[in-house]
Image (cartoon, rainbow, N blue to C red):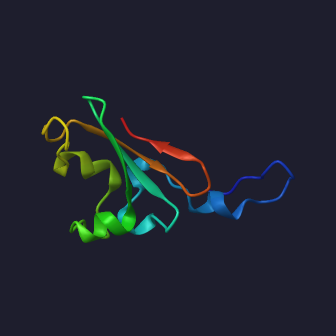
Amino acid sequence: MRHLDEDGRFSSLSVRMRPLYDTRLADLGPGDLVEAECVCGHAELLTAELLRMAGVPEHQKIEELPAYMRCQECDERGKVVVSVKWGNGERSLGN
């Protein structure tokens, strides 16, 4: 998955970005964040390290995380939409 940047050169950062349905915790680097937004409007930015400390396995698909998440504001489980904010500023959106 390579594309040219505005200067006509291949961008090394874009090679790492993946579609959300194929992104696993192991694919996230130090500058990448998982944004979790509940239907109530509460949102959190989570680092890969924080997810690892919470016990999420490396092979876990990011798209499947909402089933295990509970909102800290409204206490609803599974009502979260996730997206990845890659360290290069690009974004992979969830459903």
Image quadrant where residue 25 sits: bottom left
Say which quadrant the C terminus sits in.
top left
**Residue 85, horizontal then vertical, whole percent:** 50, 50
In percent of width and height, residue 41 lies at 31, 30
Q: Is residue 40 above or below residue 67?
A: above
Seen at 30% across and 63% down, the residue is 51
* 70 lies left or right of 29: left
Q: How many marks?
A: 0
Q: Residue 89 location in percent, x, y?
A: 60, 50
Q: Which residue lies furthest to the top in this view?
A: 40
For residue 43, which quarter of the picture? top left
Quadrant containing the N terminus in the rendered view: bottom right
Name the residue: 26% across, 39% down: 80
Residue found at x 57% / y 62%: 16
Name the residue rendered at 26%, 51% in the picture. Answer: 65
Q: Nearer the viewer, residue 86 or 46?
A: 46
Of residue 49 and residue 72, the one placed in the foreground of this image is 72
Residue 17 in the image, given as x and y percentages of width and height: 55, 56
Q: Which of 84 and 43 is in front in this view?
A: 43
